[in-house]
Amino acid sequence: MVTMLDVAKKAGVSKATVSRVLNGKNIVRPDVVSAVFKAIQETGYRPNLLARQLATQQTNFVGLVITNALFNGPYFSSLVYHAATFTEQRQHQLVIADGKHSAQDERDAINFLTDMRCKGIVVYPKYLSDEQLGEIIDKSPIPIVVVNHQVTQHPQCTVASDHYQSACRVMQHMVEKGHQSIAFIAGRENSFTGTQRLKAYRDMCHQHALDTDPRLVVQGDWTPQSGYLAAKQLIASGAEFSAILAGNDEMALGAIKALFEHGYRVPEDVSIAGFDNINLADFVTPSLTSVSIPLEQMAQKGVLMILGEHEQAQQLSIQGELIERNSIFDRST
């Protein structure tokens, strides 16, 4: 295996000089830097940057903990993409650790990234509770930012869009379009996002004296298949509804398929809307009304908070925006 000493001999310099060049020290003459890099190329040397960074207790790593159950889907792939892209723009490296299948697994992933000397860790929790997250933040030697989950003890360490207000906004839009019987396809149980959206749905039904038939609320799990099955359940129940609010766009797309299969016209017979504003929302027929969740800004804000750039982080808005398309029929006229 080629070592730094081999590079030094090839370049005719000391091992310490090679180390200074690799560390970007500007005290090395340009001709020496060129000689060192030429020697690196000729010898095929690959510097162990991790070992050097760990030895100096400094890395340019930003950690991200996310469970593999969330990997599969446009929402989370977009979140990871924006986190990786922005981290690279800030001359840092995103390191992802799998939170796997339990709160302990998520805790182990955080510990792993801490041992990797990450500058900080962005956590998208699925299993860890509010109390457990607060405890971890209290004890952590590095900054931890929690995305899409409110940590009561540490609101300053949280990056979360207001899912409750976003759901109220789309419900208000449906009511203004003349819909009085609105069904709801809920996301996975015990999800912070799903809980907030369901609460907003129920509160708006109460506020506007809408139909509260319990058959109008059906359970999904964020996937298109669950939205498809939930819509079939709604139809089979015999409950009357003129609109469906799905907990996310993927479930809304599944529901549209089920509605078409049962002879319903969308939006003339049944209107529908979702959340997340995934790319496909603009390319289905009819195009899907959705609430845009600012994933790019959420990812950027989390990274900026990790890097200590709090003033710039505060300038980013992470409020959801209603994107009106063709999937809601106006019954008010």
Image: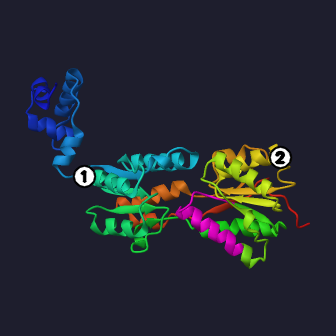
Question: At x 20% / y 38%, what residue is drawn?
Answer: 22
- Count neighbours of disc 2 (C-alpha within 10 A) and say few if under 14, some if 14 to 19, many if 20 or more: few
Q: Quadrant location of the N terminus?
A: top left
Farthest-out residue, top: 42
Q: Position of residue 104 (x, y in %)?
A: 35, 56
Coordinates of residue 130 in the picture (x, y in percent): 42, 68
Q: Which image quadrant is residue 134 in?
A: bottom left
Mostly what secondary structure, the magenta segment? helix
**Residue 190: numbered disc:** none
In the picture, measured across the screen, residue 50 lies left or right of residue 326, that is left
* 205 drawn magenta: no
| Separation (CA) of disc 1 from disc 2 | 55 Å
Q: What's the mark number on residue 115?
A: 1
Q: Amino acid at mark 1?
A: Asp
In this rendered view, identify the residue nearer to me: 182 or 167: 182
Residue displayed at 76% across by 66% down: 173
Bounds of the magenta segment: 185-204
Inspect this view and state whether residue 23 appears: no
Q: Nearer the viewer, residue 34 or 293?
A: 293
Q: Is residue 14 visible?
A: yes
Q: Which residue is mark 2?
A: 262
